[in-house]
Image (tube, grey):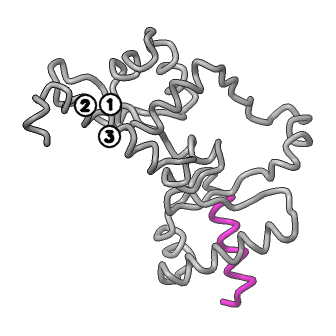
């Protein structure tokens, strides 16, 4: 197949999917190896961006998704079929930030940080599909662990979690605070 035909095939696969598609699945669909498919998709995304088309191809955790170009969202909204924008209130954003930077995290951990009940905010974020259950903690009662989703990454325009502002600095600070909290109970002469 010629490059333009491969581009069209990738567009068709992403259009029909409506969700993010793993590179390996796109590669299988267009009968190319994964490395070639990945280069092809990145090249197509750059081409589409340069042409300022009505849609974009975005990367999310090694997968790709076709979505509306934000510059043209207002036109799509006029036909009444546009997805409703999620109303992220300050409490929702605060809870989402805690989950994004501290994941996987329990509801009790969120409540300890925020100082208020997190049931409503966590449930709303799960409803918006920005947060999901990622497993169970080993602590008594085996509370649910929460983490962010690919929709969270797409909503905020991130390819992966490492793109969060100050991710590694913030993570190290959180870990350092946890470590220093534990160190406070150790006599000073033992830590020196």
Q: Is residue 27 above or below residue 141?
A: below
Mark 3 Cα within 10 Å, few/some/many (few <14, many 20+)?
few
For label 1, the residue is 145
Element under disc 3: helix
Residue at 72% from the left image edge and 82% from the top image edge: 5
Q: CA distance from mark 3 to mark 1?
A: 18 Å
Residues drawn in magenta: 1-15
59 in the magenta segment: no
Callout 2 touching callout 1 (CB < 8 Å): yes
**Compared with residue 108, is residue 25 higher up or lower down, i.e. above or below?**
below
Q: Magenta segment: does it hold 13?
A: yes
User: Residue 66 in the image: x percent, y percent?
Assistant: 68, 57
Asked if the residue at tag 2 contacts the one at tag 3, i.e. Cβ–Cβ closer than 8 Å, the answer is: no
Residue at the extreme top of the image, as rendered: 116
**Secondary structure mostly taken by the magenta-highlighted segment of the chain:** helix
Q: Residue at x 19, y 32 (%)?
A: 183
Please state if 10 lies on the left or on the right of 138 as rendered: right
Residues packed near mark 2 inside 10 Å, few (<14), some (14 to 19) or many (20 plus): some
- Which of these two is toward me, 177 or 116? 177
């Amino acid at each position: 197949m010629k490059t333009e035909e491969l581009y069209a095939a990738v567009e068709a696969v992403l259009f029909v999917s409506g969700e993010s598609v793993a590179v390996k699945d796109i590669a299988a669909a267009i009968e190319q190896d994964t490395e070639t498919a990945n280069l092809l998709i990145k090249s197509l995304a750059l081409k589409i961006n340069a042409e300022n088309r009505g849609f974009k191809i975005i990367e999310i955790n090694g997968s790709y998704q076709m979505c509306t170009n934000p510059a043209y969202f207002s036109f799509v909204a006029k036909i009444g079929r546009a997805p409703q924008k999620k109303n992220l209130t300050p409490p929702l954003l605060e809870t989402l930030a805690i989950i994004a930077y501290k994941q996987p995290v329990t509801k009790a951990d969120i409540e300890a940080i925020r100082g208020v009940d997190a049931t409503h905010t966590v449930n709303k974020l799960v409803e918006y599909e920005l947060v999901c259950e990622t497993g169970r903690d080993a602590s008594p009662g085996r509370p649910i662990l929460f983490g962010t989703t690919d929709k969270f990454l797409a909503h905020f325009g991130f390819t992966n979690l490492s793109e969060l502002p100050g991710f590694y600095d913030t993570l190290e600070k959180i870990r350092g605070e946890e470590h220093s909290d534990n160190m406070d109970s150790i006599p000073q002469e033992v830590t020196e």
